[in-house]
Image (spheres, helix red, strand yellow):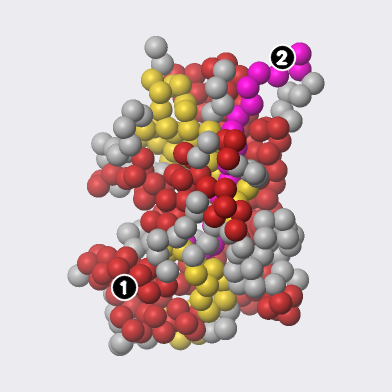
Amino acid sequence: MRKRVVFITGVAGEIGQALLKEVAQAEGYQVVTLDLQPLPRELQGLSHHIQGDILNQSLLRRLITEYDVDTIYHLAALLSTRAEFAPELAHRVNVDGTLALLQLAAEQSERRGVPVKFIFPSSIAVYGMPDQTVKQINPQVKEWEWNEPATMYGCNKLYCERLGVYFSHNYQQLAANPGTRLDFRCVRFPGLISAFTVPAGGTSDYGPEMLHAAAQRRPYACFVREEATIPFMAMPDAVTGLRALAQVPQEALSRRIYNITSFSLSAGEFRSQVLNAFPNAEITFEPDAKRQAIVDSWPAGLNDEAARKDWGWQPAYDIDRAFAEYLVPNIRERYR
């Protein structure tokens, strides 16, 4: 009998490390993880980890054949800033890798007669605000508004969202026996802030970079203007959101793609929060035109009413609690 598992790709990244700690504690499932990198030492033993490439289709097919995959958390991706420097590679990793995994998950859903849950983290990068005036008069953007991404990463994420919807509703619709289609579910995240992992190439990373630099007593030059504003979320809330969406009954969902968010801050306000905790921090502003343009294209806030209504989404960390209880004490301890 095949082993019933939860499968996490991109587990060595910021979200993956936090998610693995939570999923590994759940009863009744073995966890299988995949990443190009080895697991950090403190996470070893929590899963059966395979060091490999999401683009290795023979490896993916072997895993899907060996295990009865109940839920997939597909986190593997090339992030926004890096994707701008390597758009072809970003497309291969973010789109081709996702498409291959969706195909295999759809096939397994049909074989087992029960849908595989496919949980996909998307991003505010799927939005493209045309100018600052539009951004100001649309402070909380809904899921279907301004889906005109200005970056390769945003294009990749938006396309993969549509692929997931296709595989859930239309895949094999002309076949004589379409079987059971997979159960694709997506959350669009704001900028994520982790106290336990170092920022790894996201365009929203100027916020957490301020904190990590201040805790290490290093000067930091922020690459966006003081007034640049986007939504943020503490990493524990991101993990809670992914797991909550995975656990809700499918019939309770009115859509496949949900915004979730917590609080919005300008870069200047983020700096003030950091200075409250680290009064001697040296934080200046030296905007980079290309990265600033990306942040300008993202909304200042997200409308997450659908998630709150359908599956009870509610962030645990507002601005004050995020900094006072999660970010500052844990980052202090990291660099003690």
Seen in the picture, residue 159 relative to 260 is either above or below; the reply is above
The answer to whether residue 236 is left or right of residue 254 is left
Quadrant where the C terminus is found in the figure: bottom left
Residue that badge 1 annotates: 324
Residue 177 has which mark? 2
Q: Which residues are magenta?
A: 175-192
Q: Amino acid at mark 1?
A: Ala
* Residue name at image x 31 percent, y 73 percent: 324
Numbered disc total = 2
Residue 43: image quadrant is: top left
Q: Which mark is residue 54?
A: none
**Which residue shows up at 47% across the image and 28% down it?**
70
Asked if marks 2 and 1 touch (Cβ < 8 Å), the reply is no
Residue 277 picture location, percent across and down: 31, 80
The kind of residue tagged 2 is Asn
Q: Position of residue 71 (x, y in %)?
A: 48, 33
| CA neighbours of label 1 inside 10 A, class few (<14), some (14 to 19), many (20+) | some
- Is 180 part of what is drawn in magenta? yes
* Residue 54 visible at all: no
The CA span between labels 2 and 1 is 55 Å
Q: Quadrant of residue 283?
A: bottom left
Q: Residue 9 at what x, y percent from top left?
A: 47, 39
Q: Quadrant of the N terminus?
A: top left
Q: Secondary structure at mark 1?
A: helix
* Residue 73 highlighted magenta (yes or no): no
Q: Earlier in the sequence, mark 2 or mark 1?
A: 2
Q: Would you say residue 336 is visible in this rendering?
A: yes
Q: Is residue 258 left or right of residue 71?
A: right
The crowding category of the residue bearing disc 2, from other C-alpha atoms within 10 Å (few below 14, some 14 to 19, many at least 20), is few
Q: Which element carries disc 2, helix, strand or loop?
A: loop
Q: Residue at x 75, y 71 (%)?
A: 130
**Residue 133 left/right relative to 247:** right
